[in-house]
Image (spheres, grey):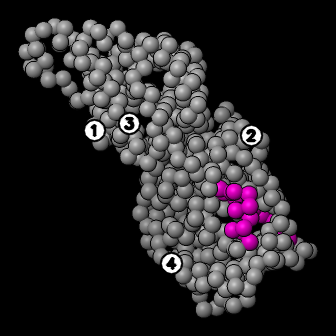
Amino acid sequence: MSNDRSLRVGLCGIGLEAYWTQFVGLKEKLEGHVSRVAARVRRAGVDVVNLGLVDTAVRSREAGHQCRRQDIDVLFLYATTYALSNTVLPIVQRAGVPVVVLNLQPEAAIDYASFNRLGDRTAMTGHWLAYCSACPVPEIANVMSRAGIPFHQVTGVLDDEQTWKEVEEWLAAAGVRSTLASLRLGLMGHYYSGMLDIMTDLTLVSITFGSHLEILEVDELTALAAEVGEADIARRVDEFRNWLDVQPDCTPDDLSRAARTSVALDALVERYDLGALAYYYKGSGNPPNEDTMSSIILGTSLLTARHVPVAGEYEVKNALAMKIMDTLGCGGSFTEFYAIDFKEDLVLMGHDGPGHIAISQERTKVRPLSAYHGKVGRGLSVEMSVKTGPVTLLSVAEDKEKHFKLQVAEGECVAGPILEIGNTNSRYRFPLGARGFVNAWNAQAPAHHCAVGVGHVACTLRKSAALMGIGFHQVC
């Protein structure tokens, strides 16, 4: 899809032109360091615009224009040695993207004995300058701060794995920012009446994240469903049986209804090139629309597993949260608090409607429901538990100071009995305990929905918030 293009990273090594004639071989050595960084970044599967070694203000302006022409998403500014701040300011001003300063020394320490045996002080100075990454960073920080340009840092050793773990987190965070900036988010229907917490300033969503919001009509989905042929319905029913654990009490009629709507949903997503969707619509008094909206769960669950997350109840912020988690490769299933198991100190969480079947512990069950609690209609629903092991909860929440914030908690999904009610449902343990977690989470005033994904990714989410210029709060 067009909103999933590869991340494009600008890489700029910085140095001082006056050094090259003074210290033979220094420039070539530093260019080699820049090439090593470029190769390692490419290993993360991103496009690299290697700007080489920028060593004058003139070259910095040229590199800044190149960044704009190449449409980079983030600029990695590699401090290879001392560089003047007037070499840095033009490129970051013209690039107009988030900046991560790489303060990467070629080795963990200078070999002092070998260094001092060089004898020739010019040679010794040239050797030292190749280790001088830390020297210009305070100067860069000062100028960037005074210019009002946010910047971020990675300090470490060039080939150290811990350093690259942090760099890769910044790459993933830049991927989140880029994905949301190019996201086409479909909004179909209206808010669930009375849920004031989920009502969102849609213009502010576009301003903050850069996402395009496509307002859709339920009537259009119903019309597309009416055009779906029997052969397509039969193929989709077969796909349901391949991907899902269809229970024996699911009727052929309900499976056909769900298949018809699922095929129509795929057509709607393709027509508008959607990367995520939020929906809710009663359809009461309009039988075709009611039929469409009450048969939507299997189709929305399949879309969610295919990287087009779908949030029910028109939860725009949670569609964004689900997309963020999906971009990080850890799922992102629609969820809310269900209950607390005080005996086992667990929080039960889940939701009706779409489930992220790709992160289910076992094959997701399909069950018929004679009523959707609080909603119109009857039909098929999905029942699953998230994979046991480490998990991260993410809420895109309102924030008075920065408009939005990422609210995050890390915990564990644990095995055990769940409520077999045709919903997603999992058991979670948190370091704060059930009481402490619930109190701490609610104290931040998020909406009542959140996205759950497998793995612990709070560090990357913190970096994502920093690159997007929004707030961040980690509960645990």
Residue 28 at x, y percent in the picture: 28, 23
Rendered image: mark on residue 90:
none
Whole-number angstrom distance, CA of label 4 to CA of label 2: 38 Å
The residue that label 4 is drawn on is 363
Q: Give yes or no for residue 33 being in the magenta stretch.
A: no
Helix, strand or loop status at disc 4: loop
Question: What residue would you read off at disc 2?
Answer: 204
Tag 3: amino acid: Ala
Is the residue marked by circle 4 packed among few (<14), some (14-19), or many (20+) residues within 10 Å? some
Label 4 vs 1, first from the N-terminus:
1
Where's residue 199, x and y in %? Answer: 77, 50
Where residue 431 sits: x, y (%)? 43, 53
Disc marking residue 160: 1
The reply to whether residue 192 is in sight is: no
Of circles 3 and 1, the one toward us is 3
Badge 1 crowding class, 10 Å Cα cut-off, few under 14, some 14 to 19, many 20 or more, is some
| Disc nearer the start of the sequence (4/3) | 3
Q: Is residue 323 left or right of residue 132?
A: right
User: Gap between marks 3 and 2, in whole Å?
Assistant: 36 Å
**Amino acid beneath label 1:** Asp
Element class at badge 2: helix
Label 3 or label 2, whichever lies nearer to me, is: 3
Residue located 51% across and 40% down the image: 8
Which of the marked residues, 4 or 2, is nearer the chain's N terminus? 2
Q: Is residue 51 visible?
A: yes
The residue under the point 69% across, 74% down is: 262
Q: Element type at marker 1? A: loop
Q: Which residue is mark 3?
A: 38
User: Above or below — where is 317 with respect to 18?
Assistant: below
Q: Quadrant of residue 299?
A: bottom right
- Please tell me which of labels 2 and 1 falls first in the chain: 1
Q: CA distance from mark 4 to mark 3?
A: 41 Å
